[in-house]
Amino acid sequence: MKKIFFVFTFLLTMAHAEIIDRILVVVNSEIILASDLRKFQHQLKSNQTFDDSLGLSYESVKKDQKLQVEYLVLQKIIESEIKRLNLSVTSERIDQEVRDIARRNRITTNDVYASVRNEGLSIAEYQDFIKSKIERQNLFSAEIISKLKVSEEEVRVEYAKKHQA
């Protein structure tokens, strides 16, 4: 009797099942959902949180859904590397960056946040964007810039080439 009740309950549950979201891509065991794409498309409407450091232009990504998915994939790959290298940023560092932005623009941090709200973003969304941007800069510094070492000999050779005349 218990078996019949279990099977009956299972079948009723299956009869009411519906698709809530759809997986678009799996990147390093992390998924990108159709809802992630819709959220990103909504964010694209305001250019506030688009990071062009991924090598894709805002205008081309805004128009092409395939590029939008590519952008999200690149974000996931970079996020994985940031986690792997433990390059996470503290909330104090985010606050410092906002203060730096305010100082460079000769306004207060409250003015920065007011401007963000006027653009339709929440403070939390803006802080997440700043956090991602700093983490990416740290990743690029750690993985790319640090590997660009030029020896003194290479400098001398290039100098000699340019000043032979």
Image: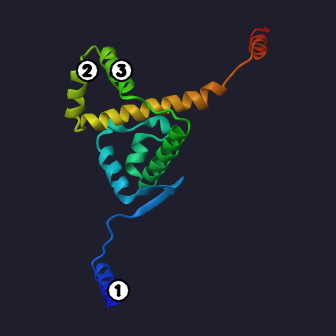
Q: Are the residues flagged by discs 2 and 3 in contact, CB closer than 8 Å? A: no
Of the pair 164 and 147, the residue shown nearer to us: 147
Could you tell me which residue is drawn at 41 percent across and 55 percent down?
Answer: 65
Lower position in the chain sequence, tag 1 or tag 2: 1
Distance of mark 3 from mark 1, alpha carbons?
58 Å
Which residue is label 2 attached to?
109
Quadrant of the image occupied by residue 43: top left
Distance of mark 2 from mark 3, alpha carbons?
10 Å
Mark 3 is surrounded, within 10 Å at the Cα level, by few (under 14), some (14 to 19) or many (20 or more) other residues, namely few
Distance of mark 1 from mark 2, alpha carbons?
60 Å
Could you tell me which residue is drawn at 35 percent across and 48 percent down?
Answer: 40
Quadrant of the image occupied by residue 162: top right
Of the pair 118 and 65, the residue shown nearer to us: 118
Q: Are the residues flagged by discs 1 and 2 in contact, CB closer than 8 Å? A: no
Which residue is label 1 attached to?
7
Which residue is label 3 attached to?
96
| Colour pattern | rainbow
